[in-house]
Image: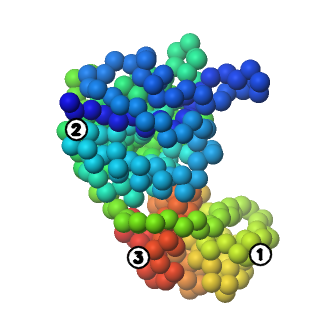
Amino acid sequence: MKKIILLATGGTISTLEDKESGGLKAKLGGEHLLKNITSQVEVEVKNFSTVNSTYLTPKDMFEMAKTIEDLLKGDEVLGLVITHGTSTMEESAFFLDLLIQSTKPVVITGAQRQAGDMWPDGPHNLEMAIRVAASTAGVGKGVCVVFSNRIFRGRDIEKVHTTALDAFSSGDRGLLGFIYADEVKFYQDNYRKTILLEEYQDVSVDIIKFYAGADGKFFETAINAQVQGIVVEGVGLGNVNQFFYEGIKKARAHGIEVVIASRSPLGRVMPQYGYLGGGHSLEKLGVIFAEDLSSPKARLLLILALNMSKNTEEIKELFKMV
C-alpha cells in the first residue's frame, strides 16, 4: 500500500504548556499530531526529535537529510512530511532543498499556535501538507513549505510575521502553488539546484550585522575564535562603512571566507558603490556576494561550500548557481 512518511521534529505544532517552566515546550510526537486530522492516504510516523527549532543545528539538518533520503527509497513511499518549528523553518527548508536528491515530494509544515490552543492551526497545515506530499503534482518540486494553504519553495521561504497564521513569504519569487479544496495547484516549476555531500564536518561560520555607527570589534572576536567563515549582513546592495571594511580586510588576511548579504528582504546584492566599504571595494578583497539569499541562508550555504572546497572562486560559483 502506498503511504506518506511523517517525520516529526518538534516545534510549536507539538508544544503544550509546561507547568514546571510556566511556558510552552515541545512535547508531542508525530502519533499525537495525526489524531486530529483526516487523511486519504496511509501515514507512517517517524520521530526525529521533539525540540523547539531554535535547538536544531546544521549538523542536525544534515542528519535529517540523510534520514529523509533513506526513508524515501521505498517504492511504497509517495512522499514525506516534516513537522518543524517555524523559528528556523526557513533555514532547514533551504538546507534540505540543497541536499536531498530524491524527486519525491518533501513538504515541511508547522504551526503558529500551540497544540493545546482552542483553535490550533497545526492540524489544518498538516492535513494540507500530506495532500501535497501525496500528489503527483508535487514530484520534482524539491523541498516545499506548506502553510495556510500556500506552497512555498524551500529556497525562498522567509518568516515575516511573529504570530500571524500566514506568517511566511517568498518575496520577489512568488508562490510555488496553492492548495484548493479540489486540487493541489502548482503555478511554477522548481528550478532547484542540489549539492551532493556524502559527509559533513562542522564548520564555524558567524554572522556579523552592520548598523549605522558600527565598528569592527566583532571581526576581531571572530578572528580570535578562528572561525572559517563570516557572513556580513550589510545594507542595500551589500555595503558597509569604513570600519567594517577594515574588519573584513583583516578577516580575509587571515584566510577567512567572507560573504556579503543584505538586510533588505527583497532584491539582491551586487558590487556597485566605490567608496571604502561599498560593494566594489569589498569585491576587491575577495568578498563573495550572496545574491538574494538572507544572511542565515548565506551562512548555511557557506558551511556547505566549505565542506566541499577551500577555494574562494569555487565558492563564488556555488553562490551564483544556487
**Which badge, 2 or 3, is on the more N-terminal residue?**
2
Give the Cα separation between the discs numbered 2 and 3: 38 Å
Q: Which residue is mark 3?
A: 317
In the displayed structure, does residue 297 sit left or right of residue 52?
A: left
Q: Tell me the tag on residue 224.
A: 1
What residue type is disc 3 on? Glu
Secondary structure beneath dot 2 equals: loop
| Quarter of the image that includes the C terminus | bottom left
Q: Position of residue 269 (x, y in %)?
A: 50, 67
- In the picture shown, does residue 315 fall above or below 115? below
Q: Residue at x 46, y 66 (%)?
A: 199
What residue type is disc 1 on? Asn
Q: Which residue is mark 2?
A: 76
Dot 2 crowding, Cα within 10 Å, few <14, some 14–19, many 20+ = few
Dot 3 crowding, Cα within 10 Å, few <14, some 14–19, many 20+ = few
- Here the colouring is rainbow
Secondary structure beneath dot 1 equals: helix
Q: Residue at x 36, y 55 (%)?
A: 100
Quarter residue 55 falls in: top right
Frontmost of labels 2 and 3 is: 2
Q: Nearer the viewer, residue 241 or 71?
A: 71
Give the Cα separation between the discs numbered 2 and 1: 52 Å
Q: Position of residue 307 (x, y in %)?
A: 50, 71
